[in-house]
Image: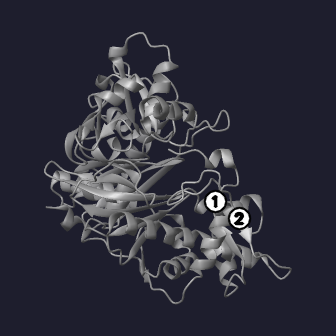
Amino acid sequence: MAVSILVIDVGTTGLRAAIVTQGGAVEHLCYEKCPPTSPFPGLVEFDARAMADAVLRVASSVLTESGPVDGVGITTQRASTIMWDADTMQPLAPGLGWQDLRTVGECISARAEHGLILAPNQTATKAKWLLSNTAITDRSRVRIGTIDSWVAAVLSGGALHVTDHSNAAVTGLFTLDTMDWSPRICEMMGVDVEMLPQIVPSSGVVGHATALPGSPPISCLIGDQQSSLVGQGCIAKGQTKITFGTGGMLDVATGDTPPKSAQRSSGGTFPIVAHSSASRIAYGAEAIMLSAGSNVEWLCEDLGLIDSPVDSDAVAASVATTDGVVYVPALLGLGTPQWDYGARGTLLGITRGTTRAHIVRAVLEGIAHRGADLVEAARADTGCSITALRIDGGMSRNATFVQALANASGLPVEVSPVTEATTLGAGFLAGVGVGTWKSLDDAVRTWSPRRVVAPNGQLDRETWRDALTRAAGWIPELSGLDF
């Protein structure tokens, strides 16, 4: 009998379920939109009950098509926070998305009063806000978790309250030295440790999905970027992937040695737990581009220079160069390595001869330059020898962009066989957890790139660095923020 794994993948604006086969294929994909709402600028909320219902719908739809599965993997957006009643399984408040900024003040206070460095996109201050702004009659029934915890609870009918090391490590409530929740930080945030989920390995059976036909074992929980890292076969030290979606996320495997600090490194990257099993914890480092594909959406939806993001490839390819035009993709500021929230998108070098094709190409090359910036930061912070890039996400299908990335980084670029490698990663880890593969090494051997793009020229990195200085500090009060 063929072995198959059901993967549930919850992103920021939608969620999907699919089957990962023993051969590493993704089949029977079912997707539903599940976007957050923004009741006020800076606030990002979502309906956790609606999310749960959608998870059950897509999972059931896939199982109807595929038949029984051997295990279930869960991969989700990280740090988004939900508070619910353990007895009724009803959310006690709207879920707070990872992009929500309502707790900036709490982050500033935590640093000033306690020397605690927290960011608003972490769980810690979101949990504090939820507890402080929700009428609670019985704290002993309160459960707080990230989306992976919520999905596991929903699938198990409330029997499970778990998260894995990869998700726990980015909450701000966790310490790498103990690999557990920090009682000190929890107390500062007003969070009872008992409210938080049990931390379990990323790969291994933790319970059963009794809400699904056949009650298959839940054998993986993993953060989305770490799942993409595994899903692109990056498990050996130095292997690196970048996911180019709305933003861009570089993750590099750094091996089994724990990082010395959980704080941001001098080069602007963060240590992460890449994945874990009962016998091993693997680490990594992460670099962040705050806006990637959103720049192409801007060309389409706001400027009207192209009809759809897909058109950017052909339009950019219609000219050989940008003819001196440079674009810095800082619509939301600059992440790694600068971490300048007040930087803004900058278009330089325009002349009377500049055409829409030059601008579109400049946008794609600007995103490629930022990808190369992330690589340089990861090398500097980790000391890893990065010899190739593996990429996924919507922009990985844009040939002009992929070539620009190869040229900017000077590295061969290996394009993922599936656009969203998160599904593959959770499938690999879940499969190892139930014995589909003997080891993660065996699982990732099924991975091979859709294509490999070698550098065929160079982009002007010196001019690029000059453009970065011109984009910096545009809104000084935001540039002064440091998380």
Q: In the picture, residue 215 is in which quadrant?
A: top left
Q: Is residue 151 above or below residue 353?
A: above
- Left or right of 449: which side holds 328? right
**x and y percentages locating residue 218 in the rendered image:** 25, 43
Q: In the picture, residue 297 is in which quadrant?
A: bottom right
Judge by depth and name the residue closer to the eye, 7 or 471: 471
Circles 1 and 2, Cβ within 8 Å, touching? The answer is: yes
Q: CA distance from mark 1 to mark 2?
A: 7 Å
For this orientation, the residue located farthest to the right is: 352
Q: In the picture, residue 460 is in which quadrant?
A: bottom right
Q: Residue at x 43, y 36 (%)?
A: 123
Q: Is residue 60 above or below residue 333?
A: above
On the question of residue 215 being in view, the answer is no
- Name the residue tied to disc 1: 330
Q: Is residue 469 above or below residue 58?
A: below
- Name the residue tied to disc 2: 346
**x and y percentages locating residue 356 in the rendered image:** 77, 75
**x and y percentages locating residue 273 in the rendered image:** 30, 51
SS state under label 2: strand
